[in-house]
Image (spheres, rainbow, N blue to C red):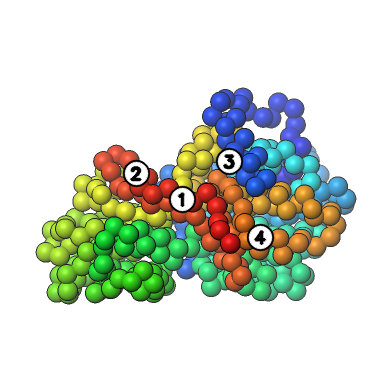
Amino acid sequence: MTETDAEPQAGILPVVKRSARILFAACALMVAGCQTIVPRGEQPTGPATTEQPADRPVEPGLPTDTQRHRVALLVPMSGANAGVGQSIANATTLALLDTKTEKVRITTYDTNLGAAAAVSRALSEGNRLILGPLMAEDARVVGPIAQKAGVPVISFSNDSSIAGNGVYSMGYAPAQSIERVVTFARSKGLNSFAALVPRGTYGERAGTSLLRAVEGAGGTVVSMQPFDRSPGSITAAVRKLDASSPYDAVLIADGGRVAIQAAPILRKSVRGSKAQVLGTELWNTESTIVGTPALRGAWFASVSDGLYRQLATRYRTRFGSTPFRLSSLGYDAVLLTVRIARDWQVGTPFPARRLADSGGFSGIDGAFRFTRNGIAERALEINQVNAGSFAVLDAAPGGFQE
């Protein structure tokens, strides 16, 4: 368990350059105004750690704090996903420093040691809001325990099935990115759609999302073929697409690494050779797809990377490592907390009703708001894969209309 508050020691802040000042100004304005899949984007050069003096006594529990809100961060700080958890924890520290809040203290609890134990300890130590956990299976454990205590949970999972009964899903929902790119494709005159979907929960949900999105946009799904992520299975699925009716666009409903395998096979097929290739939000974390000629011109929807790149630069300066892309969820969760904390009296329950603000919130990943069922609705942009880079074809909206 580690603690973070908004009172850094002298000399702890990095030298702030112009880009960092721009980020801080943007963040100040922001404060005013499936099962989790861990993307395989840039890997940290090594998780940042906080060293404690060897002779420091271990104190039982937390001291009483009547000046600040106690907020628990539940993430894996050990085990296979420790790097992701450390990135999120470090990002919450940056957010506290950037906002200069004196009303919030964040304590980190390691879910890898047991989600039930982590949330139970967090509640016993007086935390009134829980940020995390990362994994959907942990959220299913944490949710009921926190609900009994009347403490809301803002999970970083992208599995919308965990939302409800005091649990909010803040992750990037695949259904939203699919709906966004399908709507964009329809606006460009594409009417018939096909899809390659991986077998498993993610693929099933992606397929259902495609059917609903295409139907809602007035198009037609002519074929949807499952595969098991092996070259032979992908090839067989593409052949089945060739046996279907012609299609204008084809969705590769998987991450960037699978898309790199599937795209050349599609381009060599009869029907896929000229079809518009569409992707999911997972492509945003796989920069190597810009080096795949078969994916040139492909479209996908995701959160904007503009402010995240500035955050990643400051993160590397401070912690000496590269953050995971999901670290922005931790940063934005703190921005949300700080905004609500303005009208949240210390020692009282967290005002969960404020999470339903129709105007939503803004952060590193752009505008977002929680729907009635507790799922984060996000403003997404459309990106095109070019040689060596992504290009924004349709910018994300700056906010939401009622």
Q: Looking at the image, which residue is at 56% across and 58% down?
A: 401
Q: Which mark is residue 357?
A: 4
The residue carrying pointer 1 sits among few (fewer than 14), some (14 to 19) or many (20 or more) residues within 10 Å by Cα, namely some
- Of the two numbered discs 3 and 4 on the same chain, state the one appearing first in sequence: 3
Where in the figure is residue 178, as x and y percent of width and height? 39, 63
Q: Which mark is residue 191?
A: none
Q: Looking at the image, which residue is at 46% across and 47% down?
A: 304
Where in the figure is residue 122, as x and y percent of width and height? 74, 60
In the rendered image, which quarter is residue 126 located in?
A: bottom right
Q: Nearer the viewer, mark 4 or mark 2?
A: 4
- Tell me how far mark 3 sits from mark 4, CA to CA: 35 Å
Q: Which mark is residue 396?
A: 1
- Of the two numbered discs 1 and 3 on the same chain, state the one appearing first in sequence: 3
Q: Amino acid at mark 2?
A: Phe
Q: Which residue is mark 3?
A: 48
Q: Amino acid at mark 3?
A: Ala
125 sits left or right of 211 in the view: right
Q: Which residue is mark 2?
A: 390
Circles 3 and 4 in contact, beta carbons < 8 Å: no
Q: Nearer the viewer, mark 3 or mark 4?
A: 4
